[in-house]
């Protein structure tokens, strides 16, 4: 990647973050929190986006961002109020900026009038304020703005030419030729206070041509009265160069204008070279007579500072004038209100006092993998301890127990490094909902809860598509039109609620709406139509609801752009399963629909129970297991359709024989087998029959899809202590498999 | 020669670092004025380049604090700004800034401005 | 490696007793030539480009995958990565192999994935010229599907395996 590409990548990354922040801040502003901190934050965000855009030449973005930035600047310093109207405008503008950024990223051009309306609105709001910056080319100038320094004598005081005193200073024959300049320079104390350095200035002048510098030390006080940080020296510099201009000379002093007395004079050719000294002699000598610190002549201590050196016009004696201090070119009173950085408001600043560093994700991933292997190894070591070893090497056993604990702690810490708040994914949703509301003509409000819930970064990235899909579904099929809602006695504005929470070993993400609920007749009829369900098969409400996840299932009559080209919920489901999670849906007709995503807390490590099914090892996630029962003690029965069920505590639970399900050789004798009673989403139970239960352990989840493909009913694989591979049972998946199979 | 760059935009920090280290400078970085001050207290620095608009502590406040501490009178501070308006520069100067450079900057320009304010 | 993990079956290619084909050694591997690893299934010899081969292991079992095609033996643990093993004999429709410790799994990279092929034995490293590769004769559908060409070497016919076709393709059984 070229360097420019790297910077661009950094910039686009930064833009993503800034855009998310803008979304958040404006949401808060919209709900009334128009604090100075937030107003400053949004200004800075657009400011940064604009700045980078300028560096890369994204001129359309710069243009729009500049107008936006100007408005935000006016708002933050109080010139314009952040009214409801302006807030709405800004929120729209955010989306436009986001589109500009995306276009820049993809090297596309947006239509010419994109954002023009909003931009005009910005300009109109700012009209009357100082918007001189907007004129002409909005691209940042690469050259420093040059404003000539007005450092001249007031009125018509006669400039005085002062003959240098021969016995103190080097005599310079002032050959008045074109290209000779004289620069008089006296710094004020302020110049030094700003770390200005005359030597650097002279060096720069020297680069313009031949220079000679002379110090005027006349005002030097006696040592006793010498103020260490006072400014006493002045200098006269002569500069010869055929090409130098006054502007170029003054530019050298650009940074220190206002902090010094500066005169720049060109010596014309027609002027006499030398001037009578006698007229000026007393004054001149007095004024100009340098005193070295050594001599400390007190007679000189009250000398006036040297006159400005300019070209003599009149030989009449002119008194050395006190130099007219250059009018400091300060601005008109600045309207910028004092920002409140002095007040530390930790609540609104992100992480004041929290130190952070940036780390390559690759490095983190490597650590995570290593910790995963460490877990396996530690697990294996513990396994190797059989009874005799345990008895003999108690210290070793204790050591291993401590190791297990420490490893667990290390694992938790490492996983939390990669964990990030879901906020980043949630933040994209408000805009989505706005667009959907616009497209469908419905009124929809999005609520988000638990945005700070942390999830492993690798899962977060996978969440975006499923969430987008589910929200689209809610907007498209769930929420009714305002008319229908009113008729049903509901508020015209529908609500979609997006929440994230941690429960047990899982993250629960819920998308729910208060819409019409799943239209079960329609779903069932479409399912029957497509052969997903047998014509006479009876299904519970819940089973019908889960049908929306069936492959190829979609009730969209036409390919609907909103629901993502008719791609169904089955894609959502398979994406979630790929990351080890599950989806469950619950719906009440007329009231609404809730979809729950359950995701593992960590991708890597899982607590499982190791079982055997006809000598092949399998593991079942502990979080799914309710209890284990010996088959000999289990109360089995059959339902009318012939399926086997287990009766437990008054419930009838479906039975799945893993040997049969996985097409493995069956052990005829059922009585020596075991039931592992599991719970899937939505409290549905399922009883799995296995041949043997070995024990509990921790395993690292390995992907099957990395080198092979997804297998229904299997959530992944793991490597056991003896090096063999065991497959991880996907309990929810098994249950769904059954539904489809019975339908076939 | 050590330069401290203070800017909340990591794109800008990256570009500054690229240009400066290419020219032989040792580059220290901070994301806001407060971090900048922390670094100054603990590390020798020859010149500072700072943005104006930053969270936590902005550039103006940062410069004021640097000068107020009395320890850094001869530390040149360059203000990085996209704002071409006069008042921002003056404000920066009034606070104690030595000079300025406008973003986006040309690399040679950046280096030459630095050489203008520090030996 | 931690104790207990079955690693003794792994052999790298240097350790394996592979005889350099004398003719092959005479040909310098250049633009027009290929280096192949040859292996056998019964009497048939097949080859794959050496650059695709990652490792050669002795067969040490595989965890079967439920409801998978008959030529998918299962998965093995390759230093922490799960790698599927395809029974090449079965893939060619010649029935399932009954593997012993003497059988060999050739681990290869196919696209972005790593895949293991179960074969009877690995025999040679051959250097052949691209010009000597013939098209696969019509007649045998399986061969046409799974081979990219045939080459005669030392009076043997060596079928060049199309790895992608072996691993992907093939309609899934219900």
Image: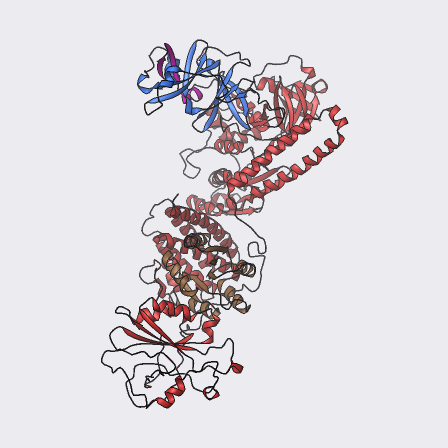
Whether residue A536 appears in this view of the structure is no
Residue at (35% x, 45% y) in the render: A107
Q: Residue A148 or A435: which is nearer the viewer?
A: A148
What range of the chain is rendered magenta? C149-174
- In the image, residue A115 sits, relative to residue B87, either above or below, namely above
* Residue A339 at x, y percent in the picture: 51, 65
Q: Which chain is red?
A: A
Residue at (30% x, 75% y) in the render: A181
* Residue A115 at x, y percent in the picture: 36, 53
* Residue A700 at x, y percent in the picture: 59, 31
Q: Which chain is brown?
A: B
Residue at (46% x, 13% y) in the render: C89
The stretch drawn in magenta includes residue A558 = no
- In the image, residue A25 sits, relative to residue A676, either above or below, namely below
Q: Which chain is blue?
A: C
Residue B81: image quadrant is bottom left
């Amino acid at each position: 990647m070229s360097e420019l590409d790297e910077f661009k990548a950094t910039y686009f990354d930064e833009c993503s973050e800034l855009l998310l922040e803008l979304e958040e801040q404006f949401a808060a502003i919209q709900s009334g929190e128009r604090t100075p901190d937030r107003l400053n934050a949004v200004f800075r965000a657009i400011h940064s986006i604009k700045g980078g855009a300028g560096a890369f030449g994204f001129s359309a973005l710069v243009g729009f961002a500049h107008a936006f930035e100007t408005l935000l600047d006016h708002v933050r310093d109080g010139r314009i109020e952040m009214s409801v109207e302006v807030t709405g405008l800004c929120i729209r503008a955010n989306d436009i900026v986001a589109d500009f950024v995306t276009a820049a990223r993809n090297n596309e051009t947006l239509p010419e009038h994109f954002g023009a309306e909003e931009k005009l609105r910005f300009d109109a709001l700012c009209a009357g304020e100082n918007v001189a910056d907007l004129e002409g080319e909005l691209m940042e100038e690469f050259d420093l703005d040059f404003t000539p320094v007005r450092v001249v004598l007031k009125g018509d005081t006669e400039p005085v030419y002062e003959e240098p005193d021969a016995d103190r200073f080097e005599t310079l024959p002032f050959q008045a030729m074109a290209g000779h300049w004289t620069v008089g320079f006296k710094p004020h104390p302020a110049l030094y206070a700003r770390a200005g350095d005359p030597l650097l200035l002279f060096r720069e002048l020297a680069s313009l041509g031949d220079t000679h510098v002379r110090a005027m030390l006349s005002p030097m006080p006696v040592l006793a009265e010498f103020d260490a940080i006072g400014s006493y020296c002045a200098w006269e510099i002569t500069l010869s160069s055929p090409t130098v201009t006054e502007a170029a000379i003054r530019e050298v002093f650009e940074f220190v204008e206002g902090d010094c007395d500066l005169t720049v004079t060109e010596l014309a050719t027609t002027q006499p070279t030398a001037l009578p000294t006698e007229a000026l002699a007393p004054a001149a000598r007095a004024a100009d007579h340098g005193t070295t610190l050594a001599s400390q002549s007190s007679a000189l201590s009250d000398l006036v500072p040297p006159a400005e050196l300019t070209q003599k016009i009149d030989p009449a004696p002119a008194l050395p004038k006190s130099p007219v201090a250059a009018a400091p070119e300060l601005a008109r009173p600045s309207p910028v209100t004092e920002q409140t950085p002095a007040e530390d408001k930790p609540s609104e600043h992100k992480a004041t006092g929290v130190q952070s560093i940036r780390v390559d994700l690759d490095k983190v991933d490597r650590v995570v993998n290593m910790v995963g292997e460490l877990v396996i190894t530690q697990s294996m070591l513990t396994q190797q301890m059989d009874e005799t070893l345990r008895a003999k090497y108690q210290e070793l056993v204790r050591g291993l127990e401590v190791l297990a604990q420490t490893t667990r702690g290390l694992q938790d810490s490492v996983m939390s490094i990669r964990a990030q708040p879901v906020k980043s994914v949630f933040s994209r949703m408000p805009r989505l909902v706005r667009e959907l509301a616009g497209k469908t003509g419905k009124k929809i409000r999005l609520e988000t809860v638990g945005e700070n819930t942390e999830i492993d970064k690798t899962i977060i990235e996978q969440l975006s598509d499923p969430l987008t899909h589910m929200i689209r579904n809610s907007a498209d099929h769930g929420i009714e039109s305002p008319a229908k809602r009113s008729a049903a006695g509901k508020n015209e504005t529908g609500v979609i609620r997006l929440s994230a929470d941690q429960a047990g070993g899982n993250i629960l993400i819920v998308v729910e709406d208060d819409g019409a609920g799943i239209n079960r007749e329609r779903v069932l009829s479409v399912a029957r139509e497509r052969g997903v369900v047998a014509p006479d098969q009876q299904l519970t409400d819940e089973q019908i609801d889960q049908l929306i996840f069936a492959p190829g299932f979609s009730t969209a009559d036409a390919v609907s752009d909103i629901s993502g080209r008719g791609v169904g919920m089955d894609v959502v489901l398979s994406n979630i399963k790929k990351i080890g999670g599950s989806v469950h849906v619950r719906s009440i007709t007329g009231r609404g629909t809730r979809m729950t995503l359950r995701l593992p807390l960590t991708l890597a490590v899982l607590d499982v129970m190791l079982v055997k099914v006809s000598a092949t090892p399998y593991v079942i996630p502990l979080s799914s297991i309710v209890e284990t029962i010996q088959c000999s003690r289990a109360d089995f029965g059959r339902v009318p359709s012939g399926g086997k069920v287990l009766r437990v505590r008054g419930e009838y639970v479906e039975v799945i024989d893993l040997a049969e399900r996985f097409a493995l050789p069956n052990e005829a004798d059922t009585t020596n087998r075991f039931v592992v009673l599991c719970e899937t989403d939505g409290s549905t139970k399922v009883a799995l029959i296995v041949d043997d239960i070995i024990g509990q352990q921790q395993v690292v989840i390995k992907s099957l899809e990395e080198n092979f493909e997804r297998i229904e009913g299997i959530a992944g694989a793991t490597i056991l202590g003896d090096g063999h591979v065991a497959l991880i049972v996907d309990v929810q998946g098994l249950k769904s498999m059954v539904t489809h199979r019975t339908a076939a | 020669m050590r330069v401290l760059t203070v800017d909340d935009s990591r794109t800008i920090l990256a570009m500054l670092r690229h240009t400066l280290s290419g020219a032989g400078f040792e580059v220290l970085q901070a994301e806001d004025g407060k971090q900048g001050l922390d670094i100054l207290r603990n590390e020798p620095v020859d010149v500072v380049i700072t943005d104006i608009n930053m969270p936590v502590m902005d550039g103006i406040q940062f410069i004021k604090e640097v000068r107020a501490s009395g320890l850094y009178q001869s530390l040149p501070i360059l203000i990085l700004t996209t704002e071409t308006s006069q008042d921002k520069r003056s404000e920066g100067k009034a606070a104690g800034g030595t000079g300025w450079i406008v973003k986006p900057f040309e690399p040679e320009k950046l280096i030459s401005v630095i050489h203008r304010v520090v030996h | 490696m931690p104790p207990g993990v079955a690693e003794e079956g792994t052999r790298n290619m240097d350790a394996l007793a592979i005889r350099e084909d004398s003719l092959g050694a005479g040909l310098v591997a250049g633009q027009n030539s290929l280096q192949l690893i040859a292996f056998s299934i019964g009497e048939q010899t097949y080859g794959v480009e050496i650059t695709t081969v990652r490792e050669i292991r002795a067969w040490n079992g595989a965890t079967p995958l439920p409801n998978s095609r008959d030529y998918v033996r299962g998965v093995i643990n390759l230093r922490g990565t799960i790698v599927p093993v395809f029974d090449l004999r079965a893939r060619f429709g010649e029935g399932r192999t009954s593997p012993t410790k003497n059988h060999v799994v050739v681990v290869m990279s196919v696209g972005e994935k790593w895949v293991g092929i179960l074969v009877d034995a690995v025999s040679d490293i051959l250097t052949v010229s691209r010009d000597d590769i013939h098209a696969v004769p019509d007649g045998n559908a399986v061969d046409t599907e799974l081979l990219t060409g045939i080459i005669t070497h030392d009076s043997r016919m060596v079928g060049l395996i199309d790895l992608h076709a072996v691993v992907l393709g093939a309609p899934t059984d219900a």
